[in-house]
Image: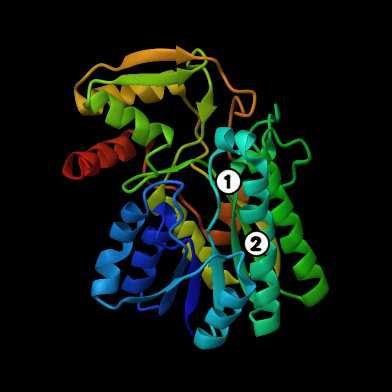
Amino acid sequence: MPVVVTGGAGFIGSHLLERLARDGVEAICLDNFDDFYSPEVKRANIAPLLEKKAISLIEADICDAQAVGDCLKRFRPEAIVHLAARPGVRQSVQVPLVYERINAFGTLTLLEEARKAGISKFLFASSSSVYGGSEKVPFSEEDTCDRPLSPYAASKKSAEAYAYSFHHLYGMRLTVLRIFTAYGPRQRPEMAIHKFARGIMEGKEVPVFGDGSSGRDYTYVDDVVEGIVSALDKGFDFEVINLGDSRVVLLRDLIRLLEEALGKKARIRREEQSSADPPLTYADIEKARRLLGYRPRVSIEEGIGRFVEWLRKNPR
């Protein structure tokens, strides 16, 4: 039976659809091609799959209950992998209502239409941002997540709460995957690795927030996809699972790795650290290892090399 992937034309979604197509799984990309970044980039992400007719494309907004319901009635999927979201921690401070509508209300809309359609398996891509500014490391799924630092983080936590309520009320089999800073080919252009690499290549100033001591748990997209596919195969009753690399990379070290891979020094422009940004993310992935057989394979050094190679081949 088919799988619906919301946000399937985006960064992680397009990689997941490629994997599902290789595995012979019928998949439907549900995407509204919003303008957070160029819709043409997203169309290019999935164009090869559409040409091969490996997936079906439904252009619809996850907040549009009628369109979502029509899609589910038409394809009668076995599962939904919900990746669609309005991303961006700092941007969410400027337009919080947009984030609430898309990330919380949009998820609730999907859950309700899935319930009506009798779809019992639902995977939701949450974020490491829900851990807020926790000083307890590494971040565990058992940690309390009630102090989000941004409207983006709050919207993701709200969506997690809706997900649990649908499991509790209707027996929907739900897996929440908290993804830690995914990167790799086709990464969104506003994300640090892509933005820094492009800036260094073009000789432009690279905006660095703070003194470079913030740390992130960067997770290569292929490893994220492996975790998603494994969770889809397992179909737990209800679980919250971290998907990360379980290694912290400081911002200054990330820039050094990019400089080495590009063979060019960065021109740094210091900017004030945003209070919406957590100073550190660091995943405890023991639960993912135990339940999913999850083993991240791509180190940050190898992953940066792969990303730079892709960027050189796709400069625009």
Residue 280 placement (x, y as % from top left): 59, 28
In-image side of 93 versus 33 (left or right): right
Alpha carbon distance from label 2 to label 1: 25 Å
Name above or below for residue 200 compared with residue 161. Answer: above
Residue 165 placement (x, y as % from top left): 79, 64
| Most foreground residue, 12 or 105 | 105
Which residue is disc 1 drawn over?
285
Quarter-wise, where is residue 307 in the image? top left
Determine whether the residue tagged by mark 1 lies in a helix, strand or loop.
loop
Q: Looking at the image, can residue 201 be seen?
A: yes
At 28% from the left and 21% from the top, the residue drawn is 204
Name above or below for residue 280 compared with residue 227. Answer: above
Query: Do the residues under discs 2 and 1 have CB atoms within 8 angstroms?
Result: no
Quarter-wise, where is residue 52 in the image? bottom left
Which residue is disc 2 drawn over?
107
Type of amino acid under label 1? Ile
Q: Quadrant of the C terminus?
A: top left
Type of amino acid under label 2? Thr
Q: Which mark is residue 197?
A: none
Residue 222 placement (x, y as % from top left): 38, 53
In-image side of 221 versus 306 (left or right): right
Q: Which dot, 2 or 1, sits closer to the camera?
A: 2
Residue 262 placement (x, y as % from top left): 21, 27
